[in-house]
Amino acid sequence: MKKEVYYWAPCLDKVGTVKSTLNSAISLSKYSSKFNVSIINVFGEWDEYADILTINRIRKINIFINIYSLLPKKGYFASRLSYIIISLISFIPLIFILKKNKPDFLLIHLLTSIPIFLFKIFKFKTRLILRISGFPKLNFFRNYLWKSSDDIFFKITCPTEELLNDLTHKKIFNKNNIYYLPDAILNIKEYISKSKNVNLETDIKLDKFFLSIGRFTKQKNFKYLIYEFKKFCLVNNEINLLIIGDGEEKKNIQELIHKNNLEKRVKILSRTNNVYCYMKKATAFILPSLWEEVGFVIVESALCNLFIISSDCPNGPKEFLQLGRGGVLFKNNEKDSLYQSMIFFLNNKKYQYSQLVITKKNSLKYTMFRHYLRLVKILIS
């Protein structure tokens, strides 16, 4: 008899975690006949993926009507209001679903406090798996919630070994229940298809350029990137900068570019359906983030044989780059550190091939199939 696996990941923004959750569900459904896979659709956040879910035999379980477009998403207080609304509309329906359907596993990824509270109150037959993403801030509330709930978790997964070791050292969870599970980032079939296209989806003309990709948020630290690139422009007039992304800080970044007279050297592309064509043509990829789990874009860059210059932020990039053996690491948010790393990159081509081999190999840990193999072991162990 097939095991029922439910995914819980109510998302306000279409961040990497959404793609990771979707790819995880697809991999489990695609590569095994032993599981029925479902995604709980709380407020319409998964409606736009309905066709993809259907094609991959993944059931979408609707809890409420589609109010995704109505919920505020930008700003701290606005997003907190949305989280309260999501909690109110999902609390009772989730109880009903778990009691009636009795899925074998519930994998929770976002807004995890809701199912955690329910499992603390009710005795469900479902096994609860906490999938930790990113670099979780262990504030008092989260620290208490996780520690006090350790007995209700069947398993806990971490996207990096560094985070796993950190949580084990702090004794947040039972060390026998916590596992390393790289995110399902790469769809190799999609990569092969899209990487054949060498035409850029923009009129922006850049012969040589550094590439950076991400949402315009504090975490991605694009202001720092602009300041450091300005210094680089004083010593190099050939290589430009292309940033692909959108978000609440986009206007501020555009004003910063204008203020520093960098309009001819720094270009912004709001979105693309094919990042691979840019990665294939870029000189190097720059990741200026203040924190990052590993980051989809750093893994995708490695797959494209694109050299990586990254901050040594917690907790994924330095692990992925093997502390600098697979690329160039600069001090996180430190003045002149990125600028000096860009210069170092241009002046030291000798060992870059061997570094690219390391990151290419590391990127293959993040394929959907590798994720599936690890996930199945966690489920059945």
Image (cartoon, rainbow, N blue to C red):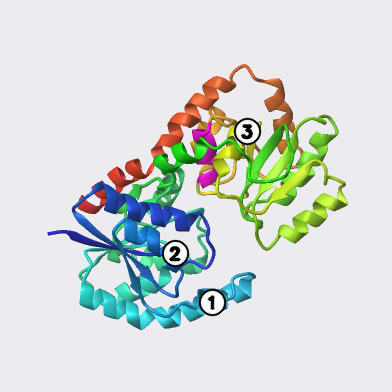
Q: Which of marks 1 and 2 precedes in the sequence?
A: 1
The local secondary structure at tag 2 comes to loop
Which residue position holds label 1? 82
- Left or right, 134 with respect to 337, comes to left
Q: Which of marks 1 and 3 precedes in the sequence?
A: 1
Residue 291 in the image: x percent, y percent? 58, 50
Q: Are marks 3 and 1 in contact (CB under 8 Å)?
A: no
Which residue position holds label 2? 110
Q: Are marks 2 and 1 in contact (CB under 8 Å)?
A: no
Q: How many marks?
A: 3
Give the quadrant of residue 336: top right
- Left or right, 59 with respect to 200, comes to left
Say the numbered circle drawn on residue 281: 3
Packing grade of label 1 (10 A; few <14, some 14-19, many >=20) is: some
**Magenta residues?**
294-304
Mark 2 is on which residue type? Leu
- Left or right, 267 with respect to 90, comes to right
* Alpha carbon separation for disc pair 2 and 1: 13 Å
The local secondary structure at tag 3 comes to helix
**Magenta-drawn stretch, dominant element (helix, strand or loop):** helix
Q: Which of marks 2 and 3 precedes in the sequence?
A: 2
Residue 253 in the image: x percent, y percent? 76, 55
- Which residue is rendered at x = 66% and y = 40% of the image? 211
* Alpha carbon separation for disc pair 3 and 2: 35 Å
